[in-house]
Amino acid sequence: MQQIIHSHIDDIRSLLAAFTVTAVLFASGGAYYAYGEAVTLTVTVAQTLTFTTNTNQFGTLTAGSYKIATTTLSVTTNDTAGWNVTLSGDDVTSPGGNTACDLDSDASVGITDQAQWVNGAATTTTGNAVARASLDSSGDVFAFRVMTASSSNGAPFLATTWWGASDADGTAKWAGIASSTVARQIGNAGTGSYSSSAHLNTVQYYLDVASSQSQGAYSCPLTFTTTGN
């Protein structure tokens, strides 16, 4: 009987020892579980657009001898949808107003404009610009156009259907300044025109007056506005 009791005691000791070893193994080795989780980062790059102008003046005009002046437009943007520019005259009234240039000493005296520019529904649709030979008042007017030359990286903006395929006299098309209440596009660079470098386009002005035009200094305040499409 004593031998049987000792045998059971030995078996229990052996089992406890085995449990102790197993516990030590789990405690020292450890049991770890790994969980995976996907993370997606998002960011939106803000639209940027910088617009500057540079203008050359008419100087002194002798009636009967037209003069040319220019404004260069510089647009830099990251807008992949493109951009457009509108032009209006601060002193032009609508509808039917036609004096963008007023005498500084008497605002009631103005220089006649060509008929206000009305752009086509698209840059491929003709507007109301005309060749110099067809200008109103036998050419004694103030008018403007967008040049085909004098542009750098500006081809997407230039609409030859609106302004003619050449700057040559007889081919180039001119129009009058639109009112500030109906500012109209003079060009639209659509989707695909993005470039990291500046888009340069030159607006050309034509001015001639009749010999009866009051002498003195005139100002022609204009507003160019560029907008992302």
Image (cartoon, rainbow, N blue to C red):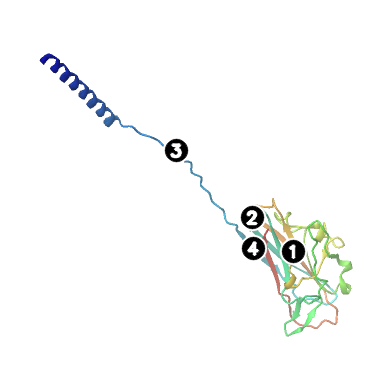
The residue at 70%/60% (across/down) is: 84
Residue 25 percent location from the top left of the image: 27, 27
Residue 42 percent location from the top left of the image: 53, 49
First-in-chain label (3 vs 2): 3
Label 1 crowd (10 A; few <14 / some 14-19 / many >=20): many
What residue is disc 2 on?
A: 79
Residue 131 percent location from the top left of the image: 86, 64
User: Which quadrant holds residue 103?
Assistant: bottom right
Looking at the image, which is closer to me, 84 or 110?
Answer: 84
The label on residue 36 is 3
SS type, badge 4:
strand
First-in-chain label (2 vs 4): 4
Looking at the image, which is closer to me, 116 or 195?
Answer: 116
Please tell me whether mark 3 or mark 4 is closer to you in this view.
3
Please tell me whether mark 3 or mark 1 is closer to you in this view.
3
Q: Amino acid at mark 4?
A: Phe
Left or right of residue 196, residue 221 in this image: right
The residue at 46%/40% (across/down) is: 37
What residue is disc 4 on?
A: 51
Left or right of residue 60, residue 228 in this image: left
